[in-house]
Amino acid sequence: MVTQPGRRAAAALAASWLAVIALATLWPAETTVTLPASCVFCGQFGGVDFALNVVLFVPLGLALRWLLGSWRTSVLVGAATTLVIETLQWRLIPGRDASLGDLLANTLGTMLGAWLATEGLRWIASTGTAARRLTVAWGLLTTATIPASAVLLRPSATRWPQWVQWTPQRPNMGVFSGQLQDVELNGVPIHARDILPPVRSLDSASRGVTVRATMSGVTRATQRRAYIVRMANGDEEGFALEQRRDAVVFRANLLAARLKLHTIAVELPHAFPIAPDGSDGEPSVVRLEGRSNPAVVTVSSESPGHTTSVALRRTVGLGWAMFIPWNFTLGPTWWPANAVWLAALMFPVAFFAGRTAHRTPDERGRGFTWWPLAMVLATIAVVPATTGLSMPTVGEWIGVLLGITAGLLPARLTTSAARR
C-alpha cells in the first residue's frame, strides 16, 4: 500500500519548492512591455505562462496537503503565497508584472496539487475495476490530446491585417547589417509598410506559408537577434525571418498562437557568409527561403558557392514545443525531446492498464485491459493522415514503446510482489 510522506519530508519538500518558486518568479527580468494587472492570458505567450504557472505550484500543493492535512488550509496558504509574490513583483522586482492571471494560475496549481496528494496515491494503488476505469479515462484523454496537438501545430491564417516590416529595429535587439532587396510571400512580392489582409497570410493551395527574401551587401554576425523581415501587428505575428549570429531563424503563424501558445521556430546555422567585425568584406547576394506547411518546416540559404538548408518534420511529437516559454529554436536533432513527450503521454495509460491485472481476492475482473493502449497507438498512426502532419519518426516510435514499457513495468513488479 502506498502511503503519503511524513510531516518532516513534507516540510522539506515545501521549503525547497518555495525556494524554486522564489527563484523562478522574483528574479529581475529585462522587458520594455508593461502588461495590465487585470489580464488573465497576458502577452504574446500568455497561454504558455498560464499553463507553466499552474504546473509550478502543483508540487507546493502536494507538500502543503501532506504537511497540513487539510485541503482548504493548503489552498489558502498557496493563495496567500502567490499574493505575496504578485505584490513583490508589482512593487519591487524590476521587469516583473503582477496580474490576475498569475494569481488564478498559481492558486489553481495549488488546488490541483492538494487534490492529487491524496487522490494520486489512490490511483497508484488502484486495482481491478478502479484501475480499469482509470485506464479508460487516461486512454480517452490521451486520445483527445494527440489530435488536438496535431491541429494546433498546423499553419494558420492570421485573424487581423498585418504590417510588413523590413529590417525593423526593436529594443533589446540587434540591427541587420545586410541590404534587403525584395521579399515574396507565397509567391507574391510584398514591400515594407504594406498592410496585408488575413487571406494573404496563408496559401490556400498548400495550406502553408512560403517566404523568400533576397539581400545583398556585407552581413556581420550579431550578438543579439535581429529581424530581417517580419509581418505582424500588435496582437499576432504572421511570420518572421531573423538573424542570430551567423544563423537565420524562421517561424510562421500556427493555430496554437490563438491560444497564446508558442509557435515553432527553426534555425539554420551558417545561413550566409559572415564578414568579420571591422572588415569591409565582399558584397554578395543571399537568397533565404522559409517554408512552413502541415508536414514540414524548411529553411534554406543560397549564395555564390554557399548553399545550405534544414528541414524539421512536423509530427505529433512536437506537442511539447508549444509550451516552451523562451525564444527557442528547433532542428532535426531535437527528436529525442519528441520521443520523451510521447513516452510521457503513454506512461499513465500503460501504468493503469498494468494495474488492471492486479486484483485483490474479493475483486472480480476481466484481467489485463489492453484496448485503451491500442486506441492511443491507432490514434498516433492515423492522425498524421487526417491532418497532413508527417508520420512519427523511428525515434519517436521508440519513445512510445519506452513509455509503454515504463508504465507496465512498475505495475508488473507490484503485482508480482503482491502474489508472493
Image (tube, rainbow, N blue to C red):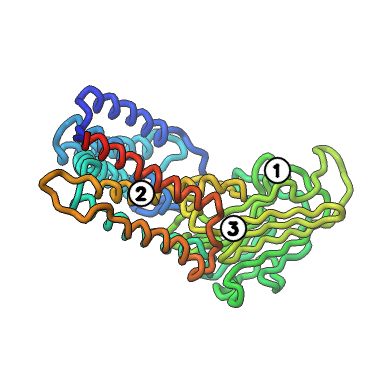
Which part of the image, by quadrant, shows the C terminus? top left
Q: Is residue 60 above or below residue 404?
A: above
Rendered residue at 50%/52% (across/down):
397
Between discs 3 and 2, the one toward the N terminus: 2
Which dot marks residue 37?
2
Tag 1–tag 2 contact (CB < 8 Å): no
Q: Amino acid at mark 1?
A: Arg
Which dot marks residue 313?
3
In front of the other: 248 or 191: 248
Q: Amino acid at mark 3?
A: Arg
* Image spot of residue 280 (x, y percent): 87, 43
* Image spot of residue 113 (x, y percent): 26, 41
Q: Image quadrant of residue 18?
A: top left
Nearest to viewer (mark 1 / mark 3): 3
Count of numbered circles in the view: 3
Q: Is residue 395 above or below residue 64?
A: below
Q: Residue furthest right?
A: 282
Q: Is residue 371 above or below residue 34?
A: below
Nearest to viewer (mark 1 / mark 2): 1
Q: Residue furthest left?
A: 362
Question: Which residue in the structure is indicated by mark 1?
Answer: 245
Q: Is residue 185 above or below residue 175?
A: below
Nearest to viewer (mark 3 / mark 2): 3
In the rendered image, is residue 88 in sight? yes
Q: Amino acid at mark 2?
A: Ala
